[in-house]
Image: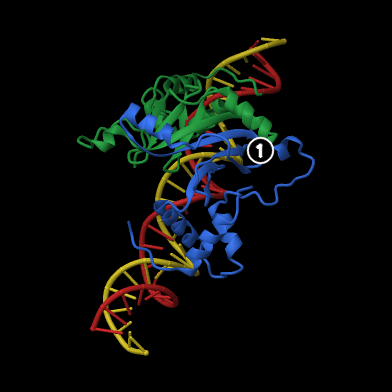
Chain colours: A green, B blue, C yellow, D red
Amino acid sequence: MRKLNFSKKRDAMLEVICSTNTHPTAEWIYNRLKSDYPNLSLGTVYRNLNLFKEQGLVVSVANVNGQERFDGNTSAHAHFVCTKCGRIIDVDCVGGSKSFDNRIASMYDCEVDRHTITFYGTCSSCRHAHSDSTADVPGLK
Amino acid sequence: MRKLNFSKKRDAMLEVICSTNTHPTAEWIYNRLKSDYPNLSLGTVYRNLNLFKEQGLVVSVANVNGQERFDGNTSAHAHFVCTKCGRIIDVDCVGGSKSFDNRIASMYDCEVDRHTITFYGTCSSCRHAHSDSTADVPGLK
DNA sequence: TTTAAAAACAGTAATCATAATTGTTTCTGT
DNA sequence: ACAGAAACAATTATGATTACTGTTTTTAAA
């Protein structure tokens, strides 16, 4: 694996990703940082996200409306995706065991690196849809 | 839900999707059919795929290298995605229970329509990589 | 069976997320 | 300080998917 130099912007990116639980898009991260780093480039965000994935610092949890969604919390946990508003919620009570992976590996003679468990449906906010509380949901049209 | 007219091409699409276990891309379906339907349009394939999803006739199982992958087998089952060759393999021995969904629904006060369980790793063929047996894998670059 | 409205379609152009390229700047170890 | 590596911005390119427009098929009812 490649050796990485230090980089202020990359650090800031990781900081942003790890301190939110909104499972942001590339663009959300970009918008978050461009006030602090006015000459940040979207290309840099994409490139660093790929590096983070390579290094296992960040995982891709879903693709919602054509946009990849990332998570800095790499501990094994599932996700719920609201198909109405695009919100992604952590689900900590199910799956996430390595024993799944091992079972599949031996059954199918393959190497299993990881697995994802993702639920799809309508979130609490959207069900009770009183107020449009989608302010902080990344990837909204 | 919308009322659908009959359509030869749409029928053929569904037939193709349901009689393969390769979890094809839109383009793979298009290429499969264009010998029988020389004036089939890729736009038609995309439009009908979206209709199939709406109607629950087909599910989207993964997004591999930026391409959506479909499955005409809508019975609950998991998938293994080879990150080397893009192959997707059915995994029939895990998950798929509605009780998961119900548990999440009550815990998070949400409506759960479905869930996906997806394993990522290196498939048998790619591990033993003697021959390039990726002939029928959709979505290969 | 005409016939008119609705839906499906081809062909094409437009979008939009992401990737690649290029030339410049910043690190980092020596 | 300096040379090579990595990071970066800016721009351009790519490629999957969607939207649009005018034409053809399908449908159901007269």
Q: Is residue B111 above or below residue B133?
A: above
Q: Which of the two residues, B5 or A106, is positioned nearer the viewer here?
A: A106
* Side of C2 relative to A102 (left or right): left
Tag 1's secondary structure?
loop
Residue at coordinates 51% horizontally, 59% vertically from top-left?
A: B14
Numbered disc 1: what chain? B
Position of the N terminus of chain B, as image quadrant, is bottom left
Q: Is residue A81 above or below residue D29?
A: above
Q: Position of residue A91 (x, y in %)?
A: 41, 26
View extreme (right): residue: B130
Query: Which residue is tagged 1?
Result: B84
* Side of B56 relative to A122 (left or right): right
Instruction: Tell me the quarter of the picture where residue A111 sits.
Output: top right
Q: Which of the two residues, B122 or B4, is positioned nearer the viewer here?
A: B4
Q: Is residue C23 above or below residue B3?
A: above
Q: Amino acid at mark 1?
A: Lys
Q: Position of residue A104 (x, y in %)?
A: 63, 32
Residue at coordinates 47% horizontally, 24% vertically from top-left?
A: A77
How crowded pointer 1 is (Cα within 10 Å; few <14, some 14-19, many 20+) is rated as: some
Q: Position of residue B87 (x, y in %)?
A: 63, 43
